[in-house]
Amino acid sequence: MRGIYKVEKINILILEGLAIFFVMLVHAGTPNYIYAFFSYGLGSLVFARGYQWKERALKDIIASRTLLLQTYYVAGFINTLIFLLVAPSNVMNYPKHIYLTNFLTGRMDKLDQVAVNAIPVWFFLMLFLAEILFYFVEKSKFVLIFLTVVSFAFRILAHEPLPFKIDAAIVAIPFFWIGREWKKRNLSVSIMDFMLATAGLNLISQVNGDISWNNQWFGKSGIISFLGEVLAIVVIVFLSDLVKKINIDKFFLRLSMNALFVISYHMLFGSLIYVGLNLFGLAISDVMGFLNRFWYIYFTIDLILVYLAISYLPSKVKALMVGDLRRVIGK
């Protein structure tokens, strides 16, 4: 990959912050052509884990990543409880135990049967399982190839998402490998790579449509969606270096350093806008229609609320809200 301006060393924290920024964007009710483009970016967060992969004992991996599982259940429960307490009757169309059961079994793909503000936490359950799975997979080339084939089968064959995000964890395996190999081979991204990747991703997203690991939906073609996700990694790698060069990286670093909290609660903070409008007597019957029309206002306010929360909430409160008990008790 040749070019005058090349990204040769990735700042993973900035990359993760940028990816989280895009996650918030796709949850803001953006028009489909924007939503589809950025929906391909989730794999970059798994790529980041592969890029940082180190040989460790299984017990060390479990010990270091248990917080992901804790965050899923603690933040997910808090979000679900708030939803069950305050959601209007026209939004909550099922018995309360349905919402709890789907949450407890990792079925966050049942979008109308889970707390909408809790949906993003599915990623932590998937990532916990995927990291443990990759520990075993990366030791055998045969097993790696086999599970890669299985991951593509999940992409190609329409299926009901499995409990506990097992299928999404398998879909994640190739992105761990790409991240690990990227660092091992010291790959770089030039401005020409970025331009071609952006054009390619734009074409794929408009032709193939949006994708969702949570719902195990990969557009018209699971193979094409994979190519789009690889192109998205190239785009985000380049942008993560660019935001540093133009000195706007501090915001993205702040998002990254508070990743568990931001991913867990950004939709809850966004829902405060809806609650606030209701308090002023401005009831919204069609929430998605409202978001599609005013997504840029919603997104801006949500960013401000999230930034204020991560800046001014006491660190132990934030730790408690993501289940980080070690930080809460000071260990």
Image (tube, rainbow, N blue to C red):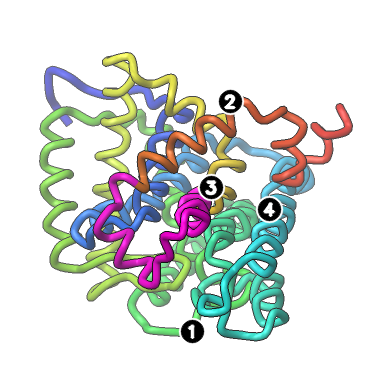
User: Does label 1 or label 4 sit earlier along the sequence?
Assistant: 4
- Is the Cβ of the residue at disc 4 closer than 8 Å to that at disc 3? no
Q: For mark 4, does the 10 Å Cα neighbourhood hold few (<14), some (14 to 19), or many (20 or more) residues?
A: many
Residue at (12% x, 23% y) in the render: 3
Total numbered circles: 4
Residue 193: % across, % down: 16, 36
Measured in 3D between alpha carbons, the distance from the residue under mark 4 to the one under mark 3, in whole angstroms, is 13 Å
Residue 46: % across, % down: 47, 48
Main SS category, magenta section: helix
User: Does label 1 or label 2 sit earlier along the sequence?
Assistant: 1
Judging depth in this view, the residue of 235 and 275 nearest the camera is 275
Q: Secondary structure at mark 4?
A: helix
Measured in 3D between alpha carbons, the distance from the residue under mark 3 to the one under mark 2, in whole angstroms, is 14 Å
- Is the Cβ of the residue at disc 1 closer than 8 Å to that at disc 4? no
Q: Amino acid at mark 1?
A: Glu
- Which residue was labeled with disc 3? 269
Q: Is residue 121 left or right of residue 317?
A: left
Whether residue 5 appears in this view of the structure is yes
Q: Is residue 179 above or below residue 270?
A: above
User: Does label 3 or label 1 sit earlier along the sequence?
Assistant: 1
Question: Which quadrant would the N terminus be assigned to in this image?
Answer: top left
User: Does label 3 or label 2 sit earlier along the sequence?
Assistant: 3
Residue at (38% x, 66% y) in the render: 287
- Which residue was labeled with disc 4? 75
Q: Amino acid at mark 4?
A: Ala
Q: Amino acid at mark 2?
A: Ser
- Which residue was labeled with disc 1? 160
Q: Residue 57 shows which numbered tag?
A: none
- Which residue was labeled with disc 2? 311
Whether residue 212 appears in magenta in the rendering, the answer is no
Whether residue 272 appears in magenta in the rendering, the answer is yes
